[in-house]
Image: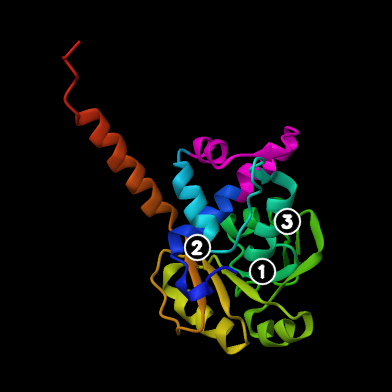
């Protein structure tokens, strides 16, 4: 048996998604079994790190065989909760919101955005391009829609000034998982799963790394 979820370090949980994506790529290439070394090398990780991360969740390897790729994929999907459909809603139908609504990768991972909301009267009542079944609703319809559709997750794509209010409304409807794309730090309770993606911060980090590489003294040992 693996350890309880509370005992698993967050980086190990994040790496599970990387392992799953790589295993799916292996399976696409008809690789039926894989060693921890092969899996680690594909992700620039040590084989010891792979074994340690997986050991938090149980025993997966087979002596003399390694990991059976299809079997490990199924088990990781179950651990991550992507072996069952999870419904989500999105608030904020700007450029990013529209792009996320039309991203087909969510469905492949068993996530389905089934409702969209915006406070702009000009957008309310309009269908999502390529998603005619999803009609943009006013934000005040969120509680009713969450209850009717059993929505579990919320995605925030509004300006920073409105993000906390939207998060509070989501939580009040019973949503317990929030993916935040707004450039704002949200305050939520310990019973709320929150993940924030600030694209500007990510670009700043890349710019710093690029600057550091450019300013690194040239290796003149050759």
Kindly give the residue lying farthest to the front in the view shown. 63
Q: Are marks 1 and 2 in contact (CB under 8 Å)?
A: no
Helix, strand or loop for disc 1: loop
Helix, strand or loop for disc 2: loop
On screen, residue 44 versus residue 82, left or right, reads: left
Q: Which of pointers 1 and 2 lies earlier in the amino acid sequence?
A: 1
In the depicted structure, whether residue 41 falls above or below residue 149: above
Where does label 2 land, which residue?
181
Where does label 1 land, which residue?
122
In the depicted structure, whether residue 40 falls above or below residue 154: above
Image quarter in which the C terminus is found: top left
Magenta range is 20-43
Estimate the spatial distance between the alpha carbons at disc 2 and disc 3, rounded to whole Å.
29 Å
For image coordinates 60% across by 75% down, the residue present is 119
Residue 103 appears in the figure: no
- Residue 16 coordinates in the image, percent (x, y): 56, 55
Chosen colour scheme: rainbow
Which corner quadrant of the image does residue 75 belong to?
A: bottom right
Residue 97 appears in the figure: yes
Dot 2 alpha-carbon crowd within 10 angstroms: few under 14, some 14 to 19, many 20 or more: many
Q: Main secondary structure of the magenta part?
A: helix
Q: Which of pointers 2 and 3 lies earlier in the amino acid sequence?
A: 3
> Which is in the foreground here, disc 2 or disc 3?
3
Q: Which of pointers 1 and 3 lies earlier in the amino acid sequence?
A: 3
Kindly give the residue lying farthest to the right in the view shown. 133
- Residue 206 coordinates in the image, percent (x, y): 35, 42
């Amino acid at each position: 048996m693996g350890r309880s979820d509370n005992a698993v370090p967050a980086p190990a949980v994040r790496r599970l998604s990387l392992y799953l994506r790589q295993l799916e790529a292996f399976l696409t290439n008809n690789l039926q079994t894989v060693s921890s070394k092969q899996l680690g090398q594909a992700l620039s990780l040590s084989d010891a790190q792979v074994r340690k991360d997986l050991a938090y969740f149980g025993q997966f390897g087979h002596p003399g065989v390694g990991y059976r790729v299809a079997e490990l994929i199924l088990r990781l999907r179950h651990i991550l909760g992507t072996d069952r459909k999870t419904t989500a809603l999105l608030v904020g139908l700007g450029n990013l919101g529209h792009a996320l609504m039309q991203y087909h990768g969510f469905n492949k991972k068993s996530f389905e955005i089934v409702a969209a909301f915006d406070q702009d009267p000009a957008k309310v009542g309009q269908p999502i391009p390529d998603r005619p079944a999803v009609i943009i609703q006013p934000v005040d319809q969120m509680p009713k829609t969450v209850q009717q559709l059993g929505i579990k997750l919320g995605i925030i794509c509004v300006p920073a000034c409105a993000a906390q209010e939207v998060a509070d409304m989501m939580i009040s409807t019973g949503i317990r998982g929030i993916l935040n794309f707004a450039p704002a730090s949200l305050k939520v309770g310990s019973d709320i799963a929150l993940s924030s993606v600030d694209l500007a911060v990510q670009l700043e980090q890349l710019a710093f790394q690029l600057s550091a590489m450019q300013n690194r003294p040239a290796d003149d040992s050759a």
